[in-house]
Amino acid sequence: MNSDITNLDDIKLLVDSFYDEIKKDKLLSPIFNGIIQDNWNIHLEKMYRFWETVLLDHHTYRGSPFMPHANLPVEKQHFETWLTIFRNTVDSFFKGEKAEEAKWRAEKMAQMFYYKINFHRKNSSTPLF
């Protein structure tokens, strides 16, 4: 039986495993690899800090997560695929309250990013926030 997400090592397992799948996905890999290029270590470190802050309440992440995504060439199917991979990754390794919270937060984040990206596209002369 899988245990819950409780520490930074769990966050690293989740993030590393998730992005290993993203890198192989036919829909998402061209977008992620095209933008991140050879900077995967930097991106992964940022994602460790982000999820550590969100799930474990250790405030190690600084920044605005939306802005780097504002102009990505993504549609609803990209977010659906991202969420499926995220949920499957969480379920493969973890079970418990934090695991469920991780999936819930990822869903809310995907919804928010999808709507904000579309708003930004339709109102490109409007400041993002």
Image (cartoon, grey):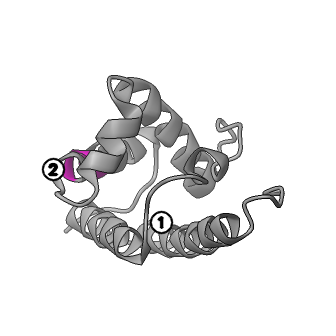
Q: Which mark is residue 9?
A: none
Q: Is residue 71 left or right of residue 45?
A: right
**Whole-percent x and y of residue 52?**
55, 45
Residue 33's image quarter? top left
Q: Which mark is residue 102?
A: 1
Say which quadrant the C terminus sits in: bottom right
> In terms of sequence position, does the residue under pointer 1 or pointer 2 come before the other?
2
**Whole-percent x and y of residue 32?**
35, 45
- Residue position marked by numbered label 2 in the rendering: 24
The kind of secondary structure element at disc 2 is helix
Say which quadrant the N terminus sits in: bottom left
Q: Measuring 52% from the left and 35% from the top, which residue is drawn there?
A: 46
Badge nearest the viewer, 1 or 2? 2
Q: Is residue 98 magenta?
A: no
Q: Is residue 52 left or right of residue 57?
A: left
Q: Measuring 55% from the left and 71% from the top, which residue is drawn there?
A: 114
**Whole-percent x and y of residue 6?**
45, 52
- Prevailing secondary structure class for the magenta stretch in the rendered image: helix
Magenta span: 17-21
Asked if 67 appears above or below 87 in the picture, the reply is above
Q: Measuring 20% from the left and 52% from the top, which residue is drawn there?
A: 21
In the rendered structure, which amino acid carries the disc numbered 1? Ala
Q: Nearer the viewer, residue 41 or 6?
A: 41
